Amino acid sequence: MEEKTLTQKPIINQVEGIFLVLPDHIGREYFVNVMEQLNWFVQQIHEGDGIKKAYQEIWTTEDRANAINYVEDPLTMTHFLWLRGSNIHDLLPEIWGRIPAYESEELLEMAVEAEEHDDAVRAVLRIAVGFPNFDSDALSIFEQYLTSTSPLLRKATIQAIAYRLWTETAPLLEKVSQEDSDEDVKSFAQNILCHLRNS
């Protein structure tokens, strides 16, 4: 298989590691096959409930210095990888070359270009997963989506904000909690703002 050229660096957090959001067609069987080819070892499997609790597989290198969580998350409707470890940056090109994943710019572009409601919801939730750290472009997407005429999309955007709880989103949450025309959206924003202030 031809290796993917890394034209865009993934979003990296030294505490949380690297998050790669997978296309919908890349599922459990595909991931397991690649991990076995690369001589990684499964250490734990956590069964999800398909509603709130994510399905997870934790794989490591033989020395256990590096780990990858494969996650099927029902809350964000995404499959993603969480990579961490002392040599993960050296291993990343080979992993990304074998497992297709969205680059950060692609996540942003999908949100900008989404025209249908369902596509927009999926796009904003993918951003929540793919950007563990504050990112000004991602914040702009949240801000744009919170002006949508659809209360369901505005609520999904609040859910995306809640996934990471960046302190920089407080002004957005404050505005929605005070000004949104939908009481459910307003109440949801108030609850998330409270969590943010208490975290």
Image: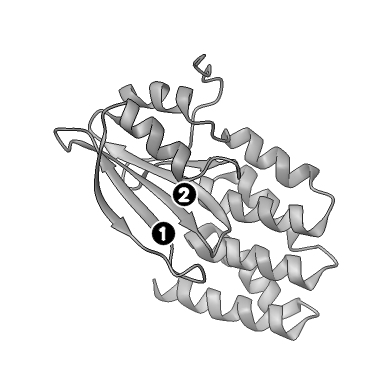
Q: Residue at x 58, y 35 (%)?
A: 102
Secondary structure category for the residue under label 1: strand
- Which one is in front in this view, the residue at disc 1 or the one at disc 2? 1
Task: Answer left or right for 52 relative to 24.
Answer: left
What residue do we see at 43% from left, 38% from top? 31
Callout 1, which amino acid? Tyr
**Among the two numbered marks 1 and 2 on one chain, the one whose residue lies closer to the N terminus:** 1
Q: Residues within 10 Å of mark 2 (few under 14, many from 20)?
A: many
In the image, what residue type sits under mark 2?
Pro
Query: Does residue 107 lie above or below 34 as drawn?
Result: below
**Residue 93 position in % (x across, y down):** 41, 22
Mark 1: few, some, or many residues within 10 Å (few <14, many ≥20)? some
Task: Identify the residue under disc 2.
Answer: 132
* Coloring applied to the structure: one colour
Q: Is residue 173 above or below residue 177?
A: above
Q: Which residue is mark 1?
A: 55
Query: Image quadrant for the C terminus?
Result: bottom left
Residue 166 in view, yes or no: no
Q: Position of residue 105 (x, y in %)?
A: 63, 34
Q: Position of residue 176 (x, y in %)?
A: 70, 73
